[in-house]
Every structure is written in structure tokens, then in C-alpha cells.
Image (cartoon, grey):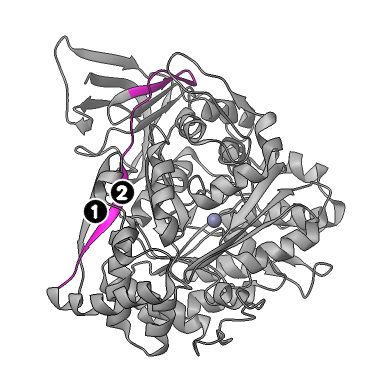
Amino acid sequence: MEELLIKNGFVYDPINGINGEIMDIAVKNGKIVEKVEGKNVRTIDASKMIVMPGGVDIHTHIAGAKVNAGRMLRPEDHFKDVEVKTERTRSGVGHSIPSTFTTGYRYARMGYTTVFDPAMAPLKARHTHEELNDTPILDKGAYPLLGDWWFVLECLAEKKIEECAAYVAWTIKATRGYAVKLVNPGGLEAWGFGGNMRNIDDIVPNFNISPREIIQGLCEVNELLNMPHTIHVHTNNLGKPGNYVTTLETMKCVENLAREDKPLIHITHCQFSAFKGRDWRTFESGAEEIAKYVNNHNHVTVDMGQVVFTDTTTMTADGPFQFILYQISGNKWVNSDVETETGTGIVPFRYKRKSYVHATQWSIGLELALLIKDPRKIFLTTDHPNAGPFTYYPKIISWLMSRGARERILKKINRRARQKSLLPTIDREYTFYDIAVVTRAGQAKALSLGRKGHLGVGTDADIAIYNLDPTDVDPSKDYRLVRKALERAAYTVKGGEIVVRDGEIVKSVEGKTFWVDVETSPSVNEFAPKLKQVFEDYYTVQYENYIVPEHHLAVSSPVHVKAEI
Ligand SMILES: [Zn+2]
């Protein structure tokens, strides 16, 4: 492996407090080191360029059974966007649901090096990991869906927190998962009977438990297990007018569990959960209320779920929400149930500038990002591909950095949406430092990935270099230049190897899969027979077949934690 010296770049490394200083970064054996010297060192001249840690995406649907069902549902998504084979890369297709190889290349071209798929049905974990194995260059991980699982509901209804923690620990290890994901807690179980949860105090059919108790219970479980990430929550009532109240209640319901200033809950793709109004006619933004709460509390982080005006594919475990979207759009629809665990829905969707609702959604995402004062509390996502494909991140960055870029779009959107939008009242423009926070530092921190998201000595040498001179380019005016430079990194370095040069893949390497190896006390094993019985009673696979063996991961990278049970 080459030794690298990245010379004279403007370095943005928020975790180490570096804000655009001209510095050299040295790389050896895949890690960042103090210095390198000798004739084997390859020098990259990064003068007049920006150097950042590799991008980190905390929430992007790129792999697994649901994503693949989306690919099969949408041949039209493949026809219009083809990635041709080169000497170093494989061919692929897909605008909103790219094939695995294409996904890896496209992220790497933008300088991203670590991504997490947030919705792994435990029973489909093997499939998810097979696709992640086939996604080149990137390091990755996946969050098992646990908020509607029968084990979890039964234990929490009986207030057996430790027993629930034992099952969750087992599931995280068995599925090689990274974080506890909740989607419309209780609502997916209700959907099995054609129902849904109307608020966080509704009662889940057959289980005598409310979403509030599920959220609080899994939050306690997450703390008992010392998981590296907080619970990752897709709220009840997502996508419905008036849901900002549910979102505030969701954040509030774990407030009393907060210790120190540590985050306890992550509200994902918050845009979809920040709606005011009684119905679609009175629909409007609830971003101000959400931002106010997040500004005043430190136990919450959120990500944007920013809408872009394009054709895309919505896919979520939130089956009842997808049914609503199917009814609204009249598009084709997939609905699926995964035994006693979770479900899914998929609907193609086009966000239109001239639609009042879509244009307001576009505004809400940006309002959240601009009204939440501390960029370490909000991360840039599109909930790929739900609000738009991840390839639009550079465009979103241009909106965050430039009032002018926002105004340009505002002029073109639905008139009523423009009149109601808060954006004209907001002057804030993100700096490159802020961008480095919302696209890498904050996300790595939220995932407790100490080796990612910064350029300190000893971290993984994942580095993005963009052809932008911050002393010359004014992002407020030159937002197009910023967007172009971020779309095609001058260099992407992954684990010490140059994988992208001038926006082209020059080398494809294999990425690691992170999963949490939870260590529990031996007494926890007493729950195993009960777990086995559940498989006997309800599952089409047996306990032993359910576990994804570690050798099934192309490059396994366990993160060890010691649980308090
Ligand atoms: Zn999502």
C-alpha cells in the first residue's frame, strides 16, 4: 500500500477544530499518521483545494430485500440511467435505486466513504449483507428493524426490560446489525390487521402496549446494551398533516431518561415528520416548532430527509404510510410482510415543483437545517431514495450554502408554497465547516465511529479532496461551482488508497461491514430456550439458520461493546 502525502490543502476537520487551515495530511498503511517521508511517498498537490474526511451517510436505503424489490418494480428507473463498464468498474443501472456496484461508485465519486442502510428486516439480514458485500469501496452497516417485533412487544408490554435487552442483543449479533431501528412503532403490527397507530398512546392490537412504551422501552434497552448509536426512530404518523405534534411527543417521551448531554434518540428524515395542518389543504410547515425543541434539548439528533424535485422511488417499512402514498399517487405499489417482524411498502413517486405539498416539503427540509442552530444535531440526508436519490447531495449543499440558490428555486415553485415558506426570512448560509459537520463529522459522532469523520492521527485514511479554493470561491454566489466540485471529487482516498481521481473511479476496493458485538453476562443465556421456542412456533426458518455467520461478511469489522446485563 502506498504512502501518501496530501500537501497544502485547505483542511476542514470539525472534530479536531480545524477550519480551513492549510495543512499536510500523511497516510501510511491505510491510516492517518503524523508524517511520512522517503522516496516511496506519493505526493498529492492539494493546493487551492478543500480537504475533508470521507463523507458519512447515517441513513440511506441501498441494500436488501426491499431495495431489490424496488429494482424489480421499476425497470423504467434502469433504462434512463446506465453506468457503463470500464476497465476498473462493473456496469450498472438505476437513477433512484442503483444496482449495488453503481451505488458504491457514485458515493465514492462524491467523496463519501461510509454509509448505513437503516432498515434491515432481521429475517432478510443475509440478503442485505450479500448486497452490502457487493457494494464496493464503501464501509457500511445496517440497522435491524426491531420496533414491531413480537419478542420486543411482548417483553415491553410486561415491562421485562432486561429480557427484551437480551433478545435485542442476540438479534443485533445474529443479524450483524449496528443500531436499533424503530419504524412507526406498533403501526406495522396494526397494519397486519389493516390498522395503524393514530398517536403514541394508541394501543397495538393484541399486545396491550402503546408506541410510547415501545419507544421508551427500546431506549432503555439501547442504554443497557451501551449501543454505539441511539435508537433510530421513524415516527408514528410520518407523512401525515399535523404529525409534528407526534414528533414532539416522541422526542419528549424519552426526555426523562436523558443523562448528561448525551443524545438518546435520533429522529430520522425529520422533514416527513414536521407537518402542520389538519389535512392536505391546510397542510403547512411545522419546522419552526421542531427546530425550537431540538435547539433547546441535547438528547435529540435528526436528519433532514430533504426533498428534491425529481422522479424517485419511496420505500419504507412503514407499510400503512405506503398504502396512503399509493392511494394519493395511483402508482404501482408493493406491500410485503416479514413474518412476525416487520413489513414494507414501495411506491414510485415524483416530487413536483408546482405541487403545493411537494414544494412545501422541499422548504421544510431546508427550514429544519437552517433553523436548527447547531449543525451537530442535524445531518444531511434525502432518506435515499425516499425524498430523492443520494446523488443530489451536492445540490442540497448548494441550497444550504447559498441564499441565492434557494431563491432561484423559490421563484419556480408553487406560488402558495412560496408565500408560506419561511426560507425568505432566513439569511443563514452554511460554511464549508458546517458542511463538513452535517456530511461527515456529526454523522460519525452520532454513530460513535471514532475512526471516521475526522482526520486525526490513527483514524482510517478516508479522505475527500475537492477542487475548490475557499479563498477564491464564494459559495453564496458561486454555488454552481461548489455543486460541480462536490459532484466529482478531485480525489477520494479510501483506507489509504486513491479510488477516485477527477470524478472517475481509478480503483475499486472492498469496504468493511461494521456490526455491534454486544457482550452480555452468561446469565442472559437463560432466555435462549424461549427464543428457540418462538422460532419453532412462528417462523419458517429455525433459530440456527437465522444467524448470519461472520464469514458471510466480505470484510467483517465488529465493534465491541459491553452491556450492563
Ligand atoms: Zn429511511
Q: Is mark 1 within 8 Å of ligand 1?
A: no
Q: Is residue 159 above or below residue 258?
A: below
Q: Secondary structure at mark 1?
A: strand
State whether residue 565 appears in this view: no
Which residue is at the front of the view, 347 or 302? 347
Residue bearing mark 2: 514
Q: CA distance from mark 2 to mark 1?
A: 7 Å
Asked whether, in this view, residue 514 is left or right of residue 378, the answer is left
Seen as rendered, the residue at the extreme top is 39
Ligand 1 is located in which of the four quadrants? Answer: bottom right
Q: Which residue is disc 1 drawn over?
A: 559
Looking at the picture, does residue 150 appear above or below residue 555? below
Residue at left offset 66%, top offset 45%: 73
User: Considering depth in this image, is 381 or 21 the residue closer to the camera?
Assistant: 381
**Neighbours of disc 2 within 10 Å: few (<14), some (14-19), many (20+):** many
Q: Are marks 2 and 1 in contact (CB under 8 Å)?
A: yes
> Residue at the spot x=23%, y=30% of the render?
30
Q: Amino acid at mark 2?
A: Phe
* Badge 2 or badge 1: first in the primary sequence: 2
78 vs 367, nearest the viewer: 78
Q: Quadrant of the C terminus?
A: bottom left
In percent of width and height, residue 53 lies at 36, 36
| Rendering coords of residue 478 (x, y %) | 62, 28
Q: Report the front residue among 31 and 101.
A: 101
User: Looking at the image, can residue 560 be seen?
Assistant: yes
Q: Residue at x 49, y 15 (%)?
A: 86
| In this view, 553 is above or below 537 | above
The residue stretch that appears in magenta = 498-521
Q: Amino acid at mark 1?
A: Val
x, y percent for residue 414: 84, 50
